[in-house]
Image: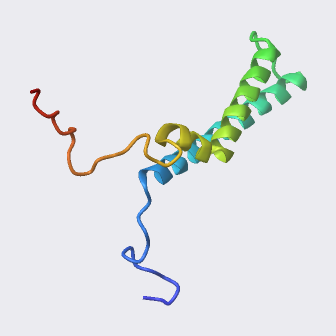
Amino acid sequence: MSEHMTSSADRPEMSPRKWFEVGARLIGVWTLLGMISELRTILVIRMELFNPSTPLLTYIIHAACDAAAGFYLLFAAGHLSGIVFGQEGRGFEVSTTSPMPPPPPPAR
């Protein structure tokens, strides 16, 4: 192996919380790409190359909502994971040992 490459055993595993953040950021990028499509449609309408039956304001609202959601997911994924997983990462735990919680103790 090259001196710059490491084996998977040398790298720490990513926690479920970190994977959640990666997924949220990817969805944020995808949403921002949708915003670009809406902006392109707005530009085409403004240049009078296309006259849709849908009002221009509809496309502007869609672009604004896509921008807000996309930027939040991209730049505030840590905040979102804090809501889902709790501030210490304990709000939503994934058990890899048992699919069901242990049964409650018998009543006395």
Q: Number of marks in the image?
A: 0
The correct choice, above or below, for 106 with respect to 21 in the image is above
The residue lying at 53 percent from left, 43 percent from top is 81
- In-front residue for pair 24/43: 24
Q: Position of residue 2 (x, y in %)?
A: 47, 89
Query: Residue 8 sits in which quadrant?
Result: bottom left
Q: 63 left or right of 7?
A: right
The correct choice, above or below, for 61 with respect to 83 in the image is above
The correct choice, above or below, for 98 with respect to 104 in the image is below
The residue lying at 75 percent from left, 16 percent from top is 58
Query: Residue 64 sits in which quadrant?
Result: top right
Query: Residue 51 sits in which quadrant?
Result: top right
The residue lying at 72 percent from left, 32 percent from top is 68
Q: Position of residue 5 (x, y in %)?
A: 48, 82
Quarter occupied by the C terminus: top left
- In-front residue for pair 94/61: 94
Q: Position of residue 3 (x, y in %)?
A: 50, 90
Q: Position of residue 4 (x, y in %)?
A: 53, 85
Give the residue furthest to the front: 108
The residue lying at 57 percent from left, 46 percent from top is 26
Give the residue furthest to the right: 47
Quarter occupied by the N terminus: bottom left
Q: 1 left or right of 45?
A: left
Q: 102 left or right of 77?
A: left
